[in-house]
Image: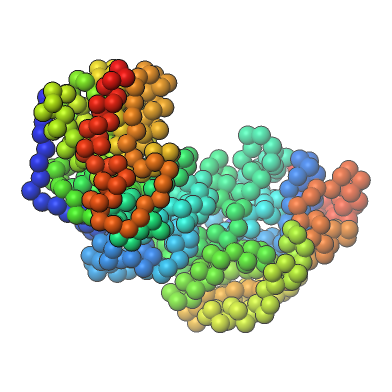
Amino acid sequence: MKRKEYNFTEKKDTRSGFGDGLLHVGKNNPNVVALCADLTGSLKMNDFKKKFPKRFFQVGIAEANMMGIAAGLTIGGKIPFTGTFANFSTGRVYDQIRQSIAYSNKNVKICASHAGVTLGEDGATHQILEDIGMMKMLPGMTVINPCDYNQTKAATMAIAEYNGPVYLRFGRPKWPIFTRENQKFEIGKAIVFTEGTDVSIFATGHMLWQALEAEKELHKSGISAEVINIHTIKPLDEETILKSINKTKCAVTCEEHNIIGGMGESISRIISENNPCPIKLVGTNDTFGQSGTPYELLEKYNLSPDYIFKSVKKVLKKK
Amino acid sequence: MSKKLNISDLKKITPQVRRDIIRMVHGVQSGHPGGSLGCTDFLVTLFFNLMDKKSSFSMDGKNEDIFFLSNGHISPVFYSVLARSGYFNVEELKTFRKIDSRLQGHPATNEGLPGVRIASGSLGQGLSVAIGAAISKKLNNDSSIVYVLLGDGELQEGQIWEALMYAAHNNINNLIITIDYNGQQIDGPVDEINSLKNLQKKFKSFGWNVVESDGNNIDDIIKTINQAKEMLKKKLPVVNIMKTIMGKGVDFMENSHKWHGIPPDDDQLKNALNQLEETLGDY
């Protein structure tokens, strides 16, 4: 594989990828059950609810109870998928997840929509930018942030097959679909989207599309960027990260999350421990979000392709 | 299924479990003797008489009654009862709260201690977990019962009331919860700290059927839990408000929150053990 340019013909929200994936695993595995805290429509869980009413549990606005019930459902062999906004899936219920799910090693899939600033107009109360940090710190927790509809659907199907607690993070806005339908999703395996030699760009979630857009501009100015999708933030694919760094000798990381405690810090640790080189973290910087359209907010909080382009230029100068 | 013991045999086990509790807490000079002593009669009766349980442990606990301890700090009584039930060797009780032990300060599952299905200690979470396990049993067409024990001070946690609403609304009628109603919490009497007021009325208004019992009277525990099992047929979960005496069985520990979480010294150990007959042999 050499350089590859990505385009899209359709936009769809990643949460719909979750909903469609959930319906699929519901059909394949009778042990899969789903719980929701009064956000069934927003989480796109209506099809599952309709098809499997006895395996769907409406918990009401009581997320702590939902996490505990999910932990209990695993006893007896059920595979519970919880659904609510990312804010209410993590910060609100951190101790319930910590004790009843992570420490107790329960096979619960915590599925979290509306993550990051692209939630838009609802504002900072709902735009969590700290969830990756909280979840990656929990021993034994797998953390996944897929990049588009197809990848989210594939990830939802993959985590049903995996035994252990998982945090699956996705979003609200309609977003370009640029990965294959019916792809195989390998937990913990980073994907090289386009090969390059000058700089490694590691991106997760919605930010992968932003990185691919930036790559097009970098290519026009003669810079060869390698864009790698880190869909699994924990466990990190150290081998793929270091292989790329050994070639490019510098990196930019991109995430729709606070750079304090996010994916970029995890990658920085791998790089600084193994092959120190210049690195720049693109993400929100120790701030809450605010109301606005998704694209206005991406611009405002330095999450645009243009900002990634400039970050690459900066890091190249430090080589 | 395990053999069920009669009342006179249960009364032989309880002083031994109380000895285990005192010796474990003394041995490591930490842990929670007060609530453990108060709940000894209940847990012994539950494990050796009331529950239909298999003799070997499986995490899924299919087709057997299962128990969750939500107020995890009374781990000494839990561990003693599990060991005396044959889930693991009683010798292991001496490792309580020591480095690399499966008997963590508060119950944990990660070291695979048989009998423990969920970590507890951070209060307020066990009822939700028990509800989940009860739903799992229903989905599996398993007609056995889920038991959970909560502290009374623990009822100050908001998650408990989320769970109570849910269980009544959804007719979780394979679940019996018991409140260790000893009226004490770390900082003092529950009534002084954040009173539960009329607890029976609270539960009833949340849609639960309520029974009340004397948790230090084995006959009454058996009678009440059997009554609770009957009441489950009314399609609602049942709560057992169980009055206990914190520190029961050791005169200088009884009725005081001071023994919630402190260990006896050497003289106090001697004094306590003199009050409790060694019926089954110390570990």
Residue drawn at (69%, 60%), measured in percent from left and top?
B44
Q: Is residue A97 above or below residue B7?
A: above
Q: Residue furthest left?
A: A9
Nearest the eye: B127 or A170 = A170
Query: What is the x, y in percent for residue A69?
Result: 45, 61
Q: Is residue B270 above or below residue B167?
A: above
Query: What is the x, y in percent for residue A175?
Result: 19, 50
Residue drawn at (66%, 45%), measured in percent from left and top?
B105
Q: How is the image coloured?
A: rainbow
Q: Is residue A174 above or below residue A311?
A: below
Residue B155 visible in the current orientation: yes
Which quadrant is the N terminus of chain B positioned in?
A: bottom right
Nearest the eye: A79 or B20 = A79
Nearest the eye: B130 or A242 = A242
Which quadrant is the C terminus of chain B positioned in?
A: top right
Query: What is the x, y in percent for residue B232?
Result: 52, 77
Quarter residue A16 falls in: bottom left
